[in-house]
Amino acid sequence: MLNRPPDARPRPGAISIWLLLVAAMVLAMIAVGGITRLTESGLSIVRWEPVSGILPPLGEEQWQAEFDAYRNSPQYQQINRGMSLAEFKHIYFWEYVHRLLGRLIGLAFALPLLWFWWRRAIPKGQGRKLAGLLALGGLQGAIGWWMVASGLVDRPEVSHIRLAVHLLAAFAIFGLLIWVALDHRELARARPRPPARMPTLAIWALSTLFLQFLFGAYVAGLEAGYAFNTWPRMGDEWFPSETPMMSPFLANFVDNPIVVQFVHRWLAMIVAALALALAAKAWLGGQRAASAALAAAVFLQVQLGILTILSGVEIGIAVAHQAMAAVLLGAVLFAAHRLRARRREIEP
């Protein structure tokens, strides 16, 4: 039986690198999730098998069994009736990769966490944060199946509200990984100062950004990106006057594709303004690298959003837009963390 090392030697630098690598995997997961959504592959695997589902079908008999199960689903019955086995393999591939990445991320987090715990390498007070991230990752897997299950009953599409929960959870996990990694990097620099508050401007930027993520998920779930493919106007008007409106009025902000696209377009400008204001604050605070990274991320994300609309939601551009959203989140968090660290340095 192995005994735990008697000496406790925290390794915050190594933990920081590990968390950033896991965050990179989550970024890849977000991109693959976008491909899965745009190729309508998410309902191709109709069972949730966390362990046995690690292996894909290995022979024609297993492939046929998977295809037969899919042919009983609403998506096949109502949309893809007559699909060939070869076509099924294509959509199965993306959903399988999406689920496989989720499993790999779980292992890439849980196994090193166990090793760091066994080596007594986790800094004091950080163990609960890491355990919480592990629990959130497990919850995300359950949310993913909860989302898929909504499209396997009557309607051949997942609930856009459940899709939004799933996507927001992915962004939250990514953001928390980045933030905790930056905390550990600071610990590695031997700066044991009491924590300072996150800048108020950063709180506003993050809050608005997550609201934008919510509407982005609604756009994806309702396929609202196809409603209008002109910029900056929607057709010939800033807001289409003939838009059929729902009752109650607030339902339009959740279920009306045209309203959802309109909000997503212009909320982006508010997010950009707040993020650029944070970049300016970082620049004036001497955090030039963080400021430049954030300004570049804002510019690229706005351009990708406009190109997604003008291209008619071309899959490569749309996936880049979704992945860039995570990069923008990381840039906002990096700038906020550097400003917080600077405040620590200048406080007595």
Image: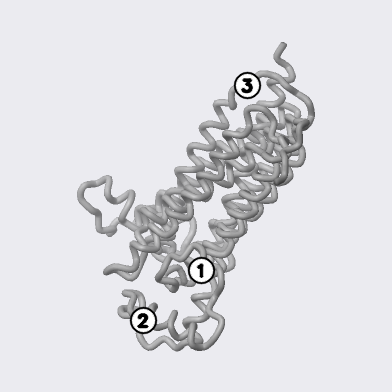
Q: Find residue 243 and report its image quarter.
A: bottom left
Seen at 63% across and 22% down, the residue is 195
- Along the line of sight, which residue is nearer the eye, 52 or 184? 52
Label 2 close to label 1 by CB (< 8 Å): no
Seen at 44% across and 57% down, the residue is 144
Please give the residue where the numbered disc 2 appears in the rendered image. Answer: 71
Please give the residue where the numbered disc 3 appears in the rendered image. Answer: 196
N-terminal label among 2 and 1:
1
Secondary structure at badge 2 equals helix
**Which residue is most to the top?**
348
Whole-percent x and y of residue 216? Answer: 46, 53
Q: Amino acid at mark 2?
A: Arg
Q: Amino acid at mark 1?
A: Ser
Whole-percent x and y of residue 41? Answer: 47, 71
Question: Tag 1: Cα neighbours inside 10 Å, few (<14), some, or many (≥20)?
Answer: few
Eyeballing the image, is 62 above or below 241?
Answer: below
Say left or right for 169 vs 21: left
Please give the residue where the numbered disc 1 appears in the rendered image. Answer: 52
